Image: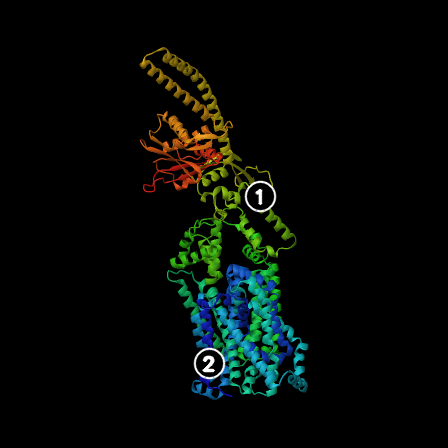
Amino acid sequence: MSFDIVHIALIGVAYIAALFFVAFATSKGWLPSRWVRHPLVFVLSLGVSLSAWTFYGIVDLAWQYGYGVLAYYLGTGAMFLFAPVALEPLARLAQRYQLTSPADLLVFRYHSRQAGTLATLFMLLGLLPLIALQIQAVAETLALLSRDSVAALGLPEAGINSKNLIAFFYCVLLAVFTSMYGATRKRRAGLASAMALESVVKLAALLGVGGYAIYGVFGGLGGLDQWLRENADMQQLLYAPIQQGSSHTLLLVFIATAVAMPHIFYLSIAEQPASRNLRVASWGFPLFLLLMALPIFPIMWAGFALDVAEPVQYFALAVPRASGSALLTTLAFIGGLSAATGALVMMTLALSTMVMNHWLLPGTRWHSEDNMYRQLVWLRRALVAALFLAGFAFYLLLNNRLSLSDLALLAFIASLQFLPGIFAVIHWPPGNRRGFITGLVAGMLVWAVGLLLPSVLGASGFTLPGTDINIPLGMTIWTQVTTVSLAINVLLFIGISLTTETSSLEQYAADLCSDDSLSQALRLQLDVTSAADFRLRLSESLGATTASQEVNRALRQLNLPADERRPLALRQLRDKLEANLSGLLGRVLAGQIIDRHFPFKDSGQPAHKDIHLIESRLSRYKNQLTGLAAELNNLRLYHRQMLEELPMAACSLGRDGEILLWNYAMQDVTGIAASEVIGSKLDYLAEPWRGLLTEFAGSTEDSLFKRQVSIGGNSHWLNLHKTRMKSTRGSKARNERGDAQMLLIEDITETQILEQELIHSERLASVGRLAAGVAHEVGNPVTGIACLAQNLHFESESSEVHDTADQILSQTQRISRIVHSLVNFSHSGSQESERAPVDLYSCVEEAVQLLSLQRDKTQVTFTNAVPEDLIAPGDNQRLIQVFINLLSNARDASPDGGNIQIDGYVRAGCACVAVTDDGPGISPQHRERILEPFFTTKEPGEGTGLGLAMVYSIVEEHGGQLELVSPANPATGRGARFIVQLPV
């Protein structure tokens, strides 16, 4: 069966376009997010590691090594099967510090730019055979399908055959698509969905071919079993390689693919959150590998049973082609094309990022006034094109001398050299950069001399000069080269790491990578004071536009305001910027930019422990703590909760003055949320707390008592206490400056109010006693005057004398009423009185008469419009006190010459008396507080703030209500009306 080259090429182009359309649609948000973020998509995207070699060449490997081929699936699957131990720590580290490639990881761990440069070089050399493998597989399978029409494509006179021309056009097509849709950060986010589709297609194709091999070629499992019994050599072929021990080396080679291959590292570790997806992948991806492995042996046996002429490595295409089914053959071709395309796209993108971040950008001092993002995109596009060109050149250089299996082993053995260094990232802190670089260089040299160069040059060995000894080289001794190179690598890495000194920066990085990272939670001081400083300084390297975008992006990710100034938040902003720039520019350049523009201050003193950072990390990893560590963490949480819920306001300060604790009571007292002040300094607080706490923290006093402060326009009284917390025991004085402090604030406002009420009550009692004495002294002469007036009235017959005597009696009666009212007012509340019908008109009238005696107050007119028959049960004298207070307040609020209207009526079973003034009214912010004791809007010395509180208390004792209407006149917006409602 032969296809027309144009038709099969169009099918391939259409499929490649469909893959990139899925990536584009995902980046645009056209696909539901629950689909895109589903763990199944993540698991399927990991299938990109199963390239064209796994689709085609794996059959050849099965023929060579029998059941030993399963080492590939076991080695790759084992890394994911033990993902919580092997991959999840790396994933957490990569997510935290935006490490997008193995080179970034190695630079971060060994704090060496040289490590990243060499890692990029060796990974590029190691992946070139794998890139050439994909190109070779597509070119040969396309030529195989269109054998009759492909010959016309060649240019024999120019030395260009049809396969090379197909490979060239395939590279050009893929370079264009990859540059368009994979070079930008936003569009690259959709590649995981495209790779998931690619995995589904190749799995379906391989299972389809395998199903045809079993049921179409052998007639079912019984037929296959019969054929194997008849061909005993095929069964023997499965076991012989295992007995030779080569399967163990295969397992060792394939176990490194999950972490050392940059495109697999990006998808499995750097791109996806580790907490959920990796746990699903720990069983999902091994299951995917199992499904991919099931058809391998049936396809191989079907190819031998059909006696196809094609090489064993292309049995996955030759078997369906022999069936005569165009649909099955096309499906098989699309499956192989899908596997090659996915691997090529991800490898070139990963390598382009590594080359740019570790070779190009760090080589010059980055400075941009233009759009840096656009420049980086075009630079990455150029690198993608260059990598495709390099892969194509390497493919031409090899000239099909190596099989797909040999090319794959060549790449996997190179990636194996990175496994010791990557393993030490988490699990061996003593490893240093000298040991890593020496071991890596030695291992790669053995690989290059033993495998790469002989493969490129076509050499199979060389003879030692002057002897007949021939040393074999090339892929025929790949097991020996693998063992020797890895052994030299590991021995040099361990030996040099143990015998050379590790720098403090390397140790710091090692601690960050290991479980001991909490020991490095230091509270270092920056020389920037606000987020605006970050924008200004970063613009020197990135340009104003890019700097502003990156800072704003980091602020959004941290949920921080644009004007953030807290030291803790600024440290978090610095870390987030470094992580984001690492994903954009690489770890090396990002570190250079951040360290240059935002260095930490060197105070000459040991750095302080960052308690907040330590607690946040403990909270994040609390589920992983066991034994004594878990018990200590529970004890910490217990004491922390005690401090947080302490009924007394508490604030903890570090030795540098940074706020470390701000408990719930402190939030209630100050009205400032803990999230707004944790990590800041006292200088950043609003008044009155800034001045009060700063002065107290800097003083030598351990306590301050009854400090009066104004909060929201109201007076509060506070007691302040503090204690100094020393880091070490010694002979230093307890009150030495510079130690950490715990400030305690006790709000005694209610106690102070009660004391003032008690003092006021004593004053009223004194006034009452004074009034009683005055009344007694005044009452005697007044009684005498009244007796003399009565005598004068009865002893004289003159009408004029009678009128004079009546006037004298009237005035003495008035004096008696005034004295009696004063005595009753001062004694009100001090004695229990019985309830009796009260004439509200008379109560109001008496209150008006008393207030009229105050000539030094504002002169107003009182209009008593209360009906004379308005009666309510109550205490006459206490009700008079109510009206005196209401009328007094109304008079004070009214302008000179104003009018105060007193109305009375019955409503809803209550006798109501309304006092209305024509003053400015009561503002909304004061309405809720006017009944509080000691709250007053009058000038100091003009009022006690107890009048309305007393009115409310008396009215409530009578079972009534006090209603406020302000403004009383909506048209003018002025006036206030107090309505006393008493049940009748």
Question: What kind of element bears circle 2?
Answer: helix
Q: Nearer the viewer, residue 806 or 302?
A: 806
Q: Is residue 644 left or right of residue 895?
A: right
Q: Is residue 544 left or right of residue 499?
A: left
Q: How is the image coloured?
A: rainbow
Residue 437: percent from the left, percent from the top?
55, 64
Label 2 amino acid?
Ile
Residue 727: give its label. Answer: 1
Total numbered labels: 2
Q: Is residue 3 left or right of residue 79?
A: left
Disc 2 crowd, CA 10 A, few/some/many (<14, 14-19, 20+): some
Residue 679: give its label. Answer: none
Q: Nearer the viewer, residue 962 or 238?
A: 962
Q: Is residue 966 above or below residue 39?
A: above
Q: Quadrant of residue 366?
A: bottom left
Label 1 amino acid?
Ser
Decide which of tag 2 and tag 1 comes sooner along the chain. 2
Question: What kind of element bears circle 1?
Answer: loop
Distance in Å between CA atoms under marks 2 and 1: 73 Å
Residue 511: percent from the left, percent from the top?
57, 56
Residue 637: percent from the left, percent from the top?
59, 49
Q: Mark 2 — residue? A: 11
Any part of residue 470 in sight: yes
Q: Nearer the viewer, residue 66 or 976?
A: 976
Q: Nearer the viewer, residue 906 or 3?
A: 906
Disc 1 crowd, CA 10 A, few/some/many (<14, 14-19, 20+): few
Q: Is residue 239 above or below residue 666?
A: below
Q: Quadrant of residue 805?
A: top left
Residue 776: percent from the left, percent from the top?
45, 18
Q: Is residue 856 above or below residue 795?
A: below
Numbered disc in front, either 2 or 1: 2
